Amino acid sequence: MTEAKSEALTISGLDCYYGEVQVLYGLDLVLNKGEVLCLFGRNGAGKTTTLKAIMGLVPSSAGSIKLAGQELTGLPAHEVPKAGVAYVPQGRRLFAEMTVAENIEIGLMARGKGKATRENVLDLFPLLRQRLRQRSGTLSGGEQQMLAMARALCLEPQVLLLDEPLGALDKALRVDMQIELKRIQREIGITTIFVTHDQEEALTMSDRIGILRDGRLVQEGPPEEIYNRPKSEFAATFLGDANIFRGDTTGDGIRLPDGTAIAAGAGAKLAAGAKASCAVRP
């Protein structure tokens, strides 16, 4: 018998506006306990807005957000962390003149946590333990990102939201931090949503990917499913390289205008005589 998955976060029919401009359209997402979901899309697609809506920083005009069945919709922003959601925004927002230890202490005091929590968090970040007396403004970009995450984890959250966690790092450091983030997530098994527009991060760091375009969820599923079975030209070309061909369906594939036949993927069922397009990966 397959073990039922426990839903950690459920977003249903979420609409959000900035003033008169709608930025999210009926967003539906279900995140199971311990999963890592990547929100992937261009700038302005609605990725950061989704995180802010979860945190109560952007009001919703329709829909609901639930944390393990508990309604978060309409909860004041300062109450959302207490409910069990931690957020690391872009820019990290550390206190540069304070030491690593002081930054962590602020996180602990704000959340009413004690020394045991601090030690548990530092066990996840051994490098930070060596830097406790160092001012956070003198840390490297990767170390600052670790500190921002450590401070967020002082909440002992059920769900962790990361907005472009590796966006400000150079390529070599990004690879190192990908490994670190995956290690930490595996070690504590925390349910995570992270935002990126980097294909490699989306494909290698997530259990599932949600592709957003202009505030709408284009496709959601495991990385290999989206890569091998994209549901739209946008998904095919945005996640990985693809050559797009257009023609007419033949039942088991499509026929191009020059007569070339391209077979459909295994298990695909196509009604003959319709206009269609297919993606061929290099």
Image (tube, grey):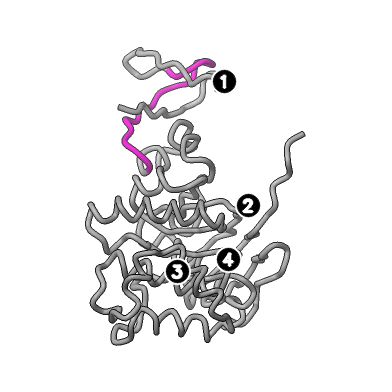
In the picture, measured across the screen, residue 80 lies left or right of residue 118, that is right
The C terminus - image quarter? top left
Lower position in the chain sequence, tag 4 or tag 2: 4
**Front label number (2 vs 3):** 3
Residue sitting nearer the eye, 208 or 191: 191
Q: Which residue is pictured at 56% across the width and 55% down the height?
A: 189
Q: What element carries label 3?
A: helix
How far across and down, in percent of the image, does residue 165 sit? 37, 62
Q: Mark 4 points at which residue?
A: 15
Q: What element carries label 1?
A: loop
Q: Which residue is pictured at 48% across the width and 32% down the height?
A: 229
Q: Name the residue under label 2.
A: 32
In the picture, measured across the screen, residue 271 lies left or right of residue 139, that is right
Q: Mark 3 points at which residue?
A: 122
Give the magenta range. 239-254
Q: Is mark 2 on a helix, strand or loop?
A: strand
Lower position in the chain sequence, tag 2 or tag 3: 2
**Front label number (1 vs 4):** 1
Q: Is residue 242 magenta?
A: yes
- Amino acid type of the residue tagged 2 in the rendering: Asn
- Amino acid type of the residue tagged 1 in the rendering: Gly
Residue sitting nearer the eye, 78 or 156: 156
